[in-house]
Amino acid sequence: MKRAHNFNAGPSALPIEVLNRAQKELLNYKGTGMSIMELSHRSKEYDEVHEKAITYLRTLLRVPDNYHVLFLQGGASLQFSMIPLNFLSSTSSAEYVLTGVWSEKALEEAEKVGKASVVTSSKHTNYNYIPDFSENQVSKDSAYVHLTSNNTIFGTQWSTYPEITKAPLIADMSSDILSREINIDQFSLLYAGAQKNLGPSGVTVVILKDELLQKANPNLPTMLDYNTYVNSNSLYNTPPTFSIYMLSLVLEWVLEQGGVPAIEATNNKKAALLYDCIDSSDGFYNAHAKPGSRSTMNVVFTLPSDELTKQFLEKSNELGFVGLNGHRSVGGCRASIYNAVPYESCEELVDFMKSFKSEN
């Protein structure tokens, strides 16, 4: 079967090796006579999967012992609410760096809980760069500082993260977790929906520093309290077992590739290939993001006219390229080149882009 060149923004490409293994194990997981989807979340077979996923995450991201690795549901969108509910008090403020739609949504949820403010933003230029941000901008009553590490719609990404000591630093890493090496110690909490780099949709990973957990609001509904997940090892209720199983397979695949450093090197090559094509097109293609803020996960670009964009998308779809439509906030096109997107797919896309330009 011919596989599509999958450039979807999410749910997105999964490694073919992972899909083949899941298919092989689907009906009879390790001799149980049942699918992993049918196993009790209290069974020893599932417990092994659950613990393996936690161990792999700790290994790949070098998570220290004073951090908890949690599996939740509700995607990043639920975290937008859980974070202020747990950590924003009546005497503090939450501070948000606005770099796109998802940071806007996170801010909106915080404003429903308490005092929240924007410390810096690139909204005035339609989010085409990552704004400067330093510790000096953090207020003395800050409960935390929140940022979105990669902006799927606008194709921007933090190249380095700010060193913050005045307040806990929290990051939504849904679209670039495991794509490059990071220093967990810089963050008090990071979270990521699985459907970009970690696996299929359904599970959300939260990595939470114990020091921040101690400050959590103790009077929350059970399922909105981080302590519930910490105290139960994310097994208070039935977790998304199949999604966690797939997560464990993807993490094992990353390890087999050589870990995060090897994945990062490949991602940089893929991104360079596409941006070089855009920058050398004499203005036929234009990247939305400014150099220095460009994402290695989402390459967002425009063409000279809406008619050419329509033709480009129609022709690319005929050739097996999927998911290249840009978001309405920017228009144009977007190639999401997450970890599982093969380098060869990027090569073929560049070949098509060059031929389309020469024809038009």
Image: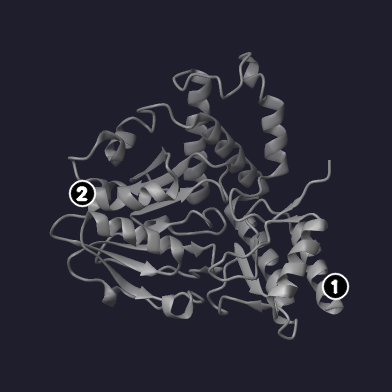
Residue 215: numbered disc:
2
Residue 334: % across, % down:
64, 65
Question: Farthest residue toward the top?
Answer: 33
| Percent of width and height locating residue 177 | 51, 54
Color style of the picture = one colour
Label 2 sits on a secondary structure element that is loop
Q: Which mark identifies residue 270? A: none
Q: Is residue 98 left or right of residue 3?
A: left
Badge 2 crowding class, 10 Å Cα cut-off, few under 14, some 14 to 19, many 20 or more, is: few
Quadrant where the image shows the C terminus:
bottom right
Q: x%, y% of residue 283?
A: 71, 84
Out of 158 and 210, give the one closest to the viewer. Answer: 158
* Residue at the farthest front position: 307
Q: Residue at x 23, y 54 (%)?
A: 113
Front one among 51 and 88:
88
Disc on the earlier residue, 1 or 2:
2
Question: In this view, which residue lies farthest toward the bottom?
Answer: 282
Q: Quadrant of the image for the N terminus?
A: top right
Q: Residue at x 58, y 41 (%)?
A: 200
Look at the picture and state if 118 lies above or below 115: below
Q: Is residue 44 visible?
A: yes
Kind of residue at badge 2: Lys
Mark 1: few/some/many CA within 10 Å (<14, 14-19, 20+): few
Label 1 sits on residue = 355
Q: Is residue 330 left or right of residue 63?
A: right
Give the tally of numbered discs.
2
Helix, strand or loop status at disc 1: helix
Could one spot residue 122 in this view of the protein?
Answer: no
